[in-house]
Image (tube, rainbow, N blue to C red):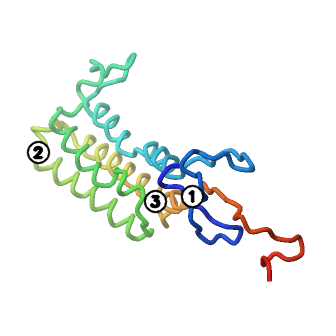
Amino acid sequence: MAPSTIYVDENNNQVAPPAGAQQQAQPAFNYPPVSSGGGEKADLLDKIRPDLIVEVLRHKLQGQELINGVWVEQPYLKDRALTATGANDLANLMLTSSSQNVAISKLKDHEIKLRAHSVAKTAQRMALKNWAEYGITGTDQLFFINEIVLGNSIITLKQPEGGGIRALLKGITTENRTVVESGEKKGFFNMGGRR
């Protein structure tokens, strides 16, 4: 048997492996094994990727559209697009609230609001200081940046509010047990064994 196999009696007490357990003895009852919870948690965690939207926003800020799996600059968005530097800086800032670590945290409403507004305020300061380098030509772009950064931050930070995703991950538990009958004979009414 695999070294991780634990043998228990009918009372859930751990017991020594029966003789011949190394030869893969066939159990009296052949129940299908239960899948491992660790794999299910890892699969679910792999699907929680709030950073993916940040990459989409980075391209969108540069005036690019996804066409057949390739990001392509759109001429009609050229006057409103940020430079690659500006889009990259803002995307990096949004990653502080759009990560897997944040998604599995346990945040309260006031923490979410404070964090989202702090990220948006920093984005505004960066955009004002670096307006030429970022390709900002009007105040409308400043409002646009604020809405994107604030909106993305609040939505992403609301997902772990109260530890919802964390609780979901904790709730995924499964067991794989092998119950082995001991050689001791027990009567139907005498469950405690021989006296």
Residue behind mark 3: 160
Earlier sequence position, callout 3 versus callout 2: 2
Q: Point out which mark residue 90 bears.
A: none
**Dot 3: what SS?**
loop
Q: Nearer the viewer, residue 134 or 27?
A: 27
Q: Going by the image, does 16 lie left or right of 120? A: right
**Residue 171, image x, y percentages:** 57, 60
Instruction: Check disc 3 and give the amino acid type.
Output: Pro
Instruction: Check disc 2 and give the amino acid type.
Output: Asn
Residue behind mark 2: 130
Q: Point out which mark residue 173 bears.
A: 1
Quarter of the image where one finds residue 185:
bottom right
Residue at 33% across / 37% down in the picture?
Answer: 57
Q: Badge 2 local density, few (<14 within 10 Å), some, or many (20+)?
A: some
Mark in front: 3 vs 1:
1
**Residue 169, image x, y percentages:** 51, 57
Mark in front: 1 vs 2:
1
**Residue 54, image x, y percentages:** 33, 41
Instruction: Check disc 1 and give the amino acid type.
Output: Thr
Q: Nearer the viewer, residue 61 or 20?
A: 20
Mark in front: 3 vs 2:
3
